[in-house]
Amino acid sequence: MAVDPSDVHDRLPCTNSVDALLRHLVSGALTEHESACPYCREQAEELRPLVTAVRQSDEQRVTAPTGLVSDVMRVVRAERRPGRTIVLDGPGPGGTEIRESAVAALLRASVDTVPGVVVGRCRIEQTARGVIIRAAVRVALDRPIPEATAAARSSMRALVEERLGLPVVRVDLDVVDVRDNGDGNR
Amino acid sequence: MCTGEATQSPTHGACALSESVLVERAQDGDDRAFETLVRRHQDTVYRIALRILREPADARDAAQEALVTAWRKLPELADTESFAAWLNRIVGRRALNVLRARRPETPIEDGERIMAAGPGPVAEAFAGGLREALFEALSGLPPPQRVCWILREMEGLGYEEIAEIVDATPTAVRGRIHRARTHLVEALESWR
């Protein structure tokens, strides 16, 4: 890395940076150089009260006040994001629409019964021929991917057909990650 | 809170889900996924606000606004793995704005602190005293210096990240941290 002129005043004669030294003093992990170097040791002595003060602040556990989560969620739920809706078939008069986010939640829940598959992003598009589902999934390392995605696909398809009464054109799954036990989910 | 929930129905087992799955779901408008994220990160968000602002009521407001802003801006977050760092930037920026809008000094604080010191074991009073002295010294710094120093030395953020929060170059951030440290070392001189 090029020498940054602004950095010079932050360097000790041994070229170690004071900021790095301070961080190591706070964490208690001095480098071999820092433990032996007279410049570093002299600087460390000067920094001692600051190091103690920072450590003490770290020890003081700060917990968010009760009610913060509910206050945040009240605002969040009051201003749901605008989203698409899916129109359901059925005898009138009157029509039924369901929000895309609600369908996505149902679809994710339907895959909860499939071991080793977790659904993240999930989009639903309604076309004249039926519904198109696109979802990002994570599959457990020990599961054959075609088998896992086939099971997820059939759960999602069944949900849309049985619960919403709509035909499914296709279910596109994007396997974004393969990891230990899916997602630590079960 | 998470351990209890994990045993419930699978749909509510969101606690065991990875951060990026929750972020993706929240981006899609799933408010329950977002609630899990809020529960996971609320202590850190509040701590950053409190360290910068010192007033619990102000810190609570800043934390709440930061979390609501996060919900609104979440669809813009491209890298779902970096949610925590992104959230820290939002609360850091929010707290800095509050700090800038404040009057230069809040004199009531001094009286409160003297009373809060109260009786107690000498060592504890000494320890609390040093910690208080640090925050006292920090309040004497200009807001951007104070924020840069807290985010670097207490929250462990990188120069680049801080630069984005305070809207300056990483070089300027390094300069501010250096000036802040010089001031703090002088202010704590009597504790050596």
Image (spheres, coloured by chain):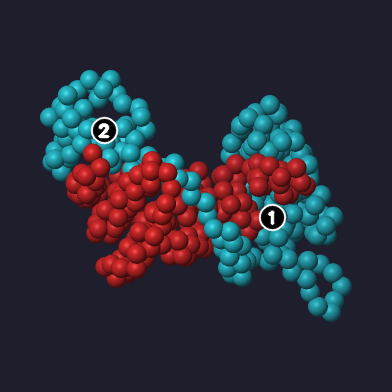
Say whether residue B143 is left or right of residue B45. left
What chain is the red one?
A: B
As drawn, B55 above or below B9: below
Quarter of the figure that contains the C terminus of chain A: top right
In the rendered image, residue A129, in percent from the top left (x then y), is placed at 74, 59
Front residue of A40 and B97:
A40
Look at label 1 and name its amino acid.
Ala
Q: Residue at x 79, y 74 (%)?
A: A95
In the rendered image, residue A52, in percent from the top left (x then y), is placed at 33, 39
Q: Residue at x 41, y 57 (%)?
A: B116
Identify the mark nearer the N-term, 2 or 1. Answer: 2
Colour in which chain A is shown? cyan
* Residue of label 1: A104
Say whether residue A16 is left or right of residue B54. left
In the rendered image, residue A51, in percent from the top left (x then y), is placed at 31, 38
Dot 1 falls on a residue whose secondary structure is helix
Q: Chain of mark 1?
A: A
Pointers 2 and 1 in contact (C-beta within 8 Å): no
Which label number is shown at residue A21?
2
Look at label 2 and name its amino acid.
Leu
Q: Find the residue positioned furthest to the right.
A: A91
Residue B159: quarter of image:
top left
The total of numbered circles placed on residues is 2
Residue A116: quarter of image:
top right
Q: Residues within 10 Å of mark 1 (few under 14, many from 20)?
A: many
Dot 2 falls on a residue whose secondary structure is helix
Q: Is residue A17 visible?
A: no
